[in-house]
Image (cartoon, rainbow, N blue to C red):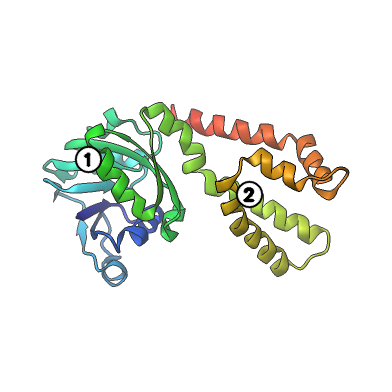
Amino acid sequence: MTLTIIGIGSMAMAMAEGLKDHHNLEFVARNLNQSEMLKKRFDATLYPLKNFDISNKNIILAVKPYALLPVALQLQGSAHTLYSILAGTPLDALHAIKADYYIRTMPNVAAKFGASSTIITGDHVKKEQASEIFSAIGDTFWVESEKEIDIATAIAGSGPALLSLVAEAMMDGLVKEGMKRPDAMGITNSLFKGFAPLIKSDHPALIKDAVMSPGGTTAAAYTALEEGAVRASFINAVKKAFEVTQR
């Protein structure tokens, strides 16, 4: 399948890294100065946005949400399927670009390593195809409503930034107590790598209970986090991210 990616920003590039071995890619953008890079990196052609004909194409729309209408005004024809990664942009709004079918997705930058968590919803007839396309960049999760994809945006989309905050804080804590920065970074990175199979196999509460011994280091650390309302702050972070998608 040929996929036409509109946009050449960081998220578009991250997805392209995962998709390039499974599909033929072409790109569309206002600025053509990245043509050589895209040809070398993805063996793909970059086309100008103005008057680009999307007729019968499978489009991945990877621009900023505010750019939807300006981009739509410059496109010609009607696409086969429009796959949008625009956060908080409902399916009805996507009809600014003509297509037979519309799908909303919410991937994240881990797509670059084939490790995205991508939430998908939209025209049910395209469920299987959408899941197949985006499985090339990681795990996919089909949900039955737009509200659910907006809720999931806080974790599926913004999650890497939230986890980066956790990782950075852990590194800073180690450095504060006297560890060299490179060692603090290496240990924290290793922790995240080892945690992935743990969280996949066990409930978080079971992992915590297995690690926390009476009066031990984990109990002390966990209490400090609870005193700082870290759990409540993360729950509130999900709420705030969801609220932004509803504006």
Relative placement, left or right, of 178 versus 183 is: right
Instruction: Please determine whether, in this image, residue 178 is positioned above or below residue 85.
Output: below
Give me the residue at 44% from left, 27% from top. 246
Which amino acid, by three-letter code, is at mark 1? Ala
Quarter-wise, where is residue 176 in the image? bottom right
| Residue 116 x, y percent position in the rendering | 44, 51
Distance between the Cα atoms at labels 2 and 1? 36 Å
| Residue 174 x, y percent position in the rendering | 77, 59
Quadrant housing the N terminus: bottom left
- Which of marks 1 and 2 precedes in the sequence? 1
Q: Is mark 2 on a helix, strand or loop?
A: helix
Which mark is drawn over residue 72?
1
Please name the residue that numbered disc 2 is placed on. 165
Relative placement, left or right, of 80 versus 71 is: left
- Is residue 96 visible from the viewing direction of this image? no
Quadrant housing the C terminus: top left
**Residue 188 or 87: which is nearer the viewer?**
188
